[in-house]
Image: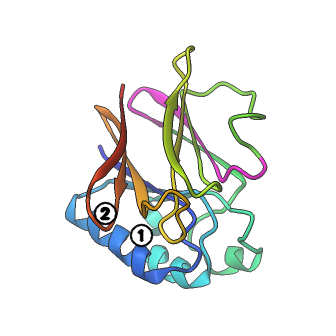
Amino acid sequence: MKIMVISDTHNDTEYTELALEVFAKDKYDRLFVLGDIGIDTLSLLNPLHEKILAVKGNCDGYELDDFARFPLPYLNYAYAFDKFIVLTHGNYYNEFNYDQKYDILLEGHSHISGLVQRKDGRIIANPGSLSLPRDYNHSFLSIDEQGLKAIDVKTGEIVHFLDF
């Protein structure tokens, strides 16, 4: 199984389309979306609604709920690779205030990609931003049985990686 994680598309259809081309070409099974989507990029994501697990970001208004073909809660959960995964945008719940159990906490919001494994083994992962990166990488996360990789969608370069 392969999971692609994107965040902070902010209506940038160009980079969202690039990510979705990679999603199809590399045969990803699931797409996790960590908020700040925008109505234009939502129209690109809706056809994949059966493969999407998402959360709402601080820039996503309630009008998205009317158009999204997938739920947009503030927290969402998955279980994959023997890991309990929590999805959040990062503005309400983040690594500093989420005190429930998890193996992997996926958060966006900062527009900076990063992978951190804490001493207790828990992982905090941020895909960065497809549209407005603050670290110059238009990146997404790839999760599979081996671990996590932050990948620049334009170049295919692995920016960060963390093995399980």
Q: How many marks?
A: 2
The quadrant of the picture occupied by the C terminus is top left
Q: Residues within 10 Å of mark 1 (few under 14, many from 20)?
A: some
Q: Label 2: which residue?
A: 23
Q: Is residue 163 left or right of residue 42?
A: left
Q: How is the image coloured?
A: rainbow
The residues colored magenta run 79-92
Q: x, y (%) of residue 13?
A: 46, 82
Q: CA distance from mark 1 to mark 2?
A: 10 Å
Q: Residues within 10 Å of mark 2 (few under 14, many from 20)?
A: some
The residue depicted at 51 percent of the width and 55 percent of the height is 128
Q: Earlier in the sequence, mark 1 or mark 2?
A: 2
- Asked if the magenta segment contains residue 87, the reply would be yes
Q: Nearer the viewer, mark 1 or mark 2?
A: 2
The residue depicted at 23 percent of the width and 58 percent of the height is 27
Callout 1–callout 2 Cβ contact below 8 Å = yes
The residue depicted at 50 percent of the width and 71 percent of the height is 131
Task: Please tell me in which quadrant of the rendered image residue 97 appears.
Answer: top right
The three-letter code of the residue at mark 2 reads Phe
The quadrant of the picture occupied by the N terminus is top left
Q: x, y (%) of residue 138?
A: 43, 64
Q: x, y (%) of residue 96?
A: 74, 34
Q: Nearer the viewer, residue 133 or 72?
A: 133
The three-letter code of the residue at mark 1 reads Leu
Q: Label 1: which residue?
A: 48
In the displayed structure, 127 sits above or below 67; it is above
Q: Nearer the viewer, residue 49 or 101?
A: 101
Q: Nearer the viewer, residue 137 or 118?
A: 137
Q: Residue furthest left?
A: 25
- Asked if the magenta segment contains residue 12, the reply would be no
Secondary structure of the residue carrying tag 2 is helix
